[in-house]
Image: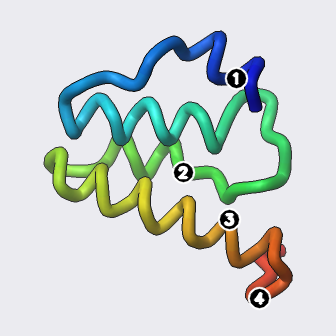
């Protein structure tokens, strides 16, 4: 995780950029199998609020997957 943080740099200040930064953090290339592919959905979002909600949902989904609460695949 630290390597990904080093590559991405500090979290941006604006909500929209934070959501994109979060998506890049949890859904890197090549994929690590921790999060479903969210890049297309992130790019399709109409506004920053939708991007932020998607980032939160993706993080929760990944937590649920890793904890065994709800497997993604």
Q: Is mark 4 on a helix, strand or loop?
A: loop
Q: Which residue is drawn at 39% across and 59% down?
A: 54
Left or right side of 59 for 52: left
Q: Which residue is drawn at 70% across and 56% down?
A: 35
Q: Mark 4 points at which residue?
A: 69
Furthest residue in direction bottom, as rendered? 69
Left or right side of 49 for 58: right
Where residue 6 appears, x then y in whole percent? 65, 12
Quadrant of the rendered structure where residue 59 is?
bottom right
Left or right side of 21 for 66: right
Quadrant housing the C terminus: bottom right
Q: Name the residue under label 1.
A: 4
Q: Which of marks 1 and 3 is nearer the N terminus?
A: 1
| Residue 38: mark | 2
| Residue 28: mark | none
Q: Residues under labels 1 and 3: Cα distance?
A: 16 Å
Q: Residue at x 68, y 65 (%)?
A: 62
Q: Residues under labels 4 and 3: Cα distance?
A: 10 Å
Q: Residues under labels 3 and 2: Cα distance?
A: 11 Å
Q: Name the residue under label 3.
A: 62
Q: Residues under labels 4 and 2: Cα distance?
A: 20 Å
Q: Is mark 1 on a helix, strand or loop?
A: helix
Badge 1: few (under 14), some or many (20 or more) residues near its Cα, within 10 Å?
few
């Amino acid at each position: 995780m630290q390597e990904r943080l080093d590559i991405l740099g500090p979290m941006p200040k604006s909500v929209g950029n934070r959501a994109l930064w979060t998506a890049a953090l949890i859904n890197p290339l090549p994929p690590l199998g921790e999060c479903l592919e969210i890049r297309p959905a992130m790019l399709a979002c109409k506004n920053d609020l939708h991007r932020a909600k998607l980032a939160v949902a993706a993080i929760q989904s990944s937590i649920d997957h890793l904890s065994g609460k709800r497997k993604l695949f």
